[in-house]
Amino acid sequence: MSLLSSVAVFFVIWWLCLFVVLPFGVKSQHESNEIVPGSDPGAPQQPLLLRRALATTLLAMIVFSGIYLYFGVYQLTLEDLLP
């Protein structure tokens, strides 16, 4: 697996993991009864984006390492997954 393809695969995995991590622990303004004027009541009270970005990066690194081991180190293919 070349460096460019590894970066591209990691980028795709990171975005997929971001959408998995985003909904966890979110409390909307409506749930906390502290609605900021001019904002949507369903908006998160504290998005904690830096913490979510770090969690996404950690999860993406774990997933990517498994994919890299399978395809890069062991040189297996998708056909090897089939029984």
Image (spheres, helix red, strand yellow):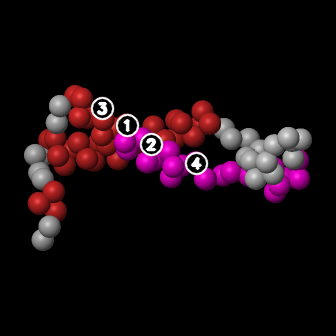
Could you tell me which residue is drawn at 12 percent across and 71 percent down?
A: 83
Disc on res. 11? 1
In this image, 24 relative to 1: left or right?
Answer: right
Q: Earlier in the sequence, mark 1 or mark 4?
A: 1
Q: What element carries label 2?
A: helix
Disc on res. 7? 3
Q: Earlier in the sequence, mark 3 or mark 2?
A: 3
Q: How far apart are marks 4 and 3 (CA)?
A: 22 Å
Give the vertical position of 3 relative to 59 (above or below): above
Write down the region rendered in magenta: 12-34
In the rendered image, the quadrant that contains the N terminus is top left
Q: Which amino acid does label 2 sit on?
A: Trp
Q: Distance between the residues labelled 1 and 3?
A: 6 Å
Q: Where is residue 74 in the image (x, y as percent from the top left)?
A: 12, 46
Q: Are marks 4 and 2 in contact (CB under 8 Å)?
A: no
Q: Which amino acid does label 3 sit on?
A: Val
Q: How crowded is mark 1: few (under 14 residues within 10 Å), some or many (20 or more)?
A: some
Q: How far apart are marks 1 and 4 (CA)?
A: 16 Å
Q: Mark 2 points at which residue?
A: 15
Q: What residue type is labelled 4?
A: Leu
Most extreme residue toward the front is 38
Q: Which of marks 4 and 2 is nearer the N terminus?
A: 2
Disc on res. 41? none
Q: Position of residue 19 (x, y in %)?
A: 51, 49
Q: Do the residues labelled 1 and 3 touch (CB within 8 Å)?
A: yes
Q: Mark 4 points at which residue?
A: 22
Q: What residue type is labelled 1?
A: Phe
Q: What element carries label 1?
A: helix
Could you tell me which residue is drawn at 30 percent across and 35 percent down?
A: 8
Q: Distance between the residues labelled 4 and 2?
A: 11 Å
Give the vertical position of 71 relative to 6 (above or below): below
Q: Is mark 3 on a helix, strand or loop?
A: helix
